[in-house]
Amino acid sequence: MPEQQLPEWADPAIAPADLDAQGVSRRQLLGRAGLFGAAFALGGAATPAVAAPGRDLGGEDPRLAYLVGDHHVHSVYSHDAKYTFSQQARAAAKYGLDWMVFNEHSNFGHAHYGAELEHQEILKARAENPRRLIFQGLEWYIPAAEHCTVFAAPGPNEVDLLTRFELAYDGKLLGYADGAPDNPNTARNEAHAVKAIQWLAQQRRAGYVDDVLVLANHPLRLGIDSPHEMRNWRDAAPEIMIGMEGAPGAQGAAIPGWGGATAIRGEYQNAPSANSYAGYPAGAYLTYGGFDWATATVGGLWDSMLAEGRLFSITTNSDNHRTVFDTWKNGDWPAGRNFDNTGRLPDPVDTDAPQPGSDFWPGEFSRTHVGVTRYGYRAVMAGLRAGRVWLDHGHLLDGLDVRLKRDCDSGRGVTLGGRLRARKGERITLYVTVTTASRANPHGVLPQLAHVDVIRGAVRGPVTDRDTWQAPDTKVVQTKDVSGRKGTYTLRIPLAAGDESFYVRLRGSDGNRNGAGWLGASVDPHGPVTHEPGQGDPWADTWFYSNPIFVDVEGR
């Protein structure tokens, strides 16, 4: 692989005058973390994993820089997309992404032709764009369920891993997807999904690839990802199956006057089907502030998984197939050619007239921020696995750093995805350092954060009913009004360890649209709400979310 280079904002050879406002802000954040220059050197070293609890109380995580990325991008190598590989890569660079994953839809054309063709483009793009981290992935049709992003670290076997996996374990190719005519045995299909994740873990352990990760995509769009299936995937190999999209792509689907009278952000306008999990309420098939119901509901499905005391990360992404207001259309097929015998769509053609679409470009609206100590592919994957992740819509924030410390300790404490060990009743403090938006977002609006919510839930261990989707002890415990605050500031939020282990996570928004959460105002007094069909302006309702920090409480 060609020599990697630091991104412009992290490269001391690039003068500050040559950076845009976002680049300047990110360099300042890197400097505050003590990582600018040689301290953020390139190399194979990954972000240190979360340490196993030892005898000492407390905990200490390294200073982090946050790399911005998108793990769900499509190109002409997906049968239902439109853009060339280079169009997507240029857009990602324009909107400030450091890393991106091309995860094309699985099908026989892709497995037999497209995956290898795209791999050659990826190798070329890595050589031509050494300041970007470009992963190759696959959008896996999960047997008996929806979709997942699967992606591997660069290496000699990355494309072979993906195609072997696709042919052996893809629900669509095997006829193992819910609703297939030859699908009388859902239990068989669910078991095959577990075997698939275990197979990936085996390839990593054997050293066939350096690393591989899986994330569930748009989990509640169709409601066919049941709670027990998600738990089964996680438990099959938690180091591989690390989480889910907290917010789907297609965030432009319900722009007023554009997406149609019934459109919902994320293309979540789907009524339950015969294959949907019967235990989900009707409201589960909508988005709330653009976020999936499983994530947006305080005390809901995501919290019920966290309440078991196990990390399950969230992300956001573009899922870019067709960008809103874009003027390109798919090109025409030559005679005798189709996706099945080529694995690649014809290049798109510019029509000079807006074409149908629901998506934003990678990094234009949705951003996943991953904490690392060094720049590189393995560092991004290790940061995702460790849960050092926060996400925002509409470029709501420039930076977020979260630390939890015992009051009697010095040092940096633990950060997102980590675990703090504390004594029963001990005083601890949550430090939330916010860097507000420094420039107008791609919509031309300077975002303003209005509030930061602290969400706390008890950790009770594994559930008896694996289809549980509620965590009754999770609620918003504090809200900090930060309206009008600018620049970088730190919120100091006192907490007490209490009698049992727990976790805390953060959420905040521009304050434009909120109301009582799904489980009531006593749980979430001003959470995200859904919008009227066809009236979901995403730029007017933006949120950030963070992964949790766990607190393991011991007796005195």
Image: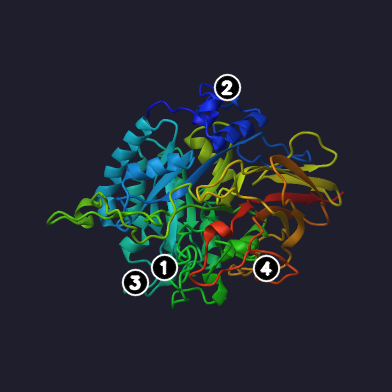
Say which of marks 4 and 2 sits in front.
Answer: 4
Looking at marks 3 and 2 on the same chain, the residue that comes earlier in the sequence is marked by 2
Nearer to me, 363 or 226? 363
Q: Which residue is mark 2?
A: 38
Nearer to me, 232 or 114? 114
Q: Residue at x 62, y 44 (%)?
A: 437
Q: CA distance from mark 1 to mark 2?
A: 52 Å
Q: CA distance from mark 4 to mark 1?
A: 42 Å
Looking at marks 3 and 4 on the same chain, the residue that comes earlier in the sequence is marked by 3
- Tag 4 secondary structure: loop
Q: CA distance from mark 4 to mark 2?
A: 47 Å
- Tag 2 secondary structure: helix
Say if 12 sits above or below 139 in the image: above
Q: CA distance from mark 1 to mark 3?
A: 13 Å
Residue kind at label 4, given as amino acid type: Gly
| Count of all numbered marks drawn on residues in the image | 4
Q: Which residue is mark 3?
A: 180
Q: CA distance from mark 3 to mark 2?
A: 54 Å
Say if 37 sits above or below 346 in the image: above
Looking at marks 1 and 2 on the same chain, the residue that comes earlier in the sequence is marked by 2
- Tag 3 secondary structure: loop
Crowd band around label 1 with a 10 angstrom C-alpha radius: few (<14), some (14–19), many (20+):
few
Q: Position of residue 325 (x, y in %)?
A: 39, 56
- Along the horizontal axis of the image, is 449 left or right of 175? right
Looking at marks 4 and 2 on the same chain, the residue that comes earlier in the sequence is marked by 2
Q: Which residue is mark 1?
A: 188
Residue kind at label 2, given as amino acid type: Ala
Q: Which residue is mark 4?
A: 515
Nearer to me, 488 or 280? 488
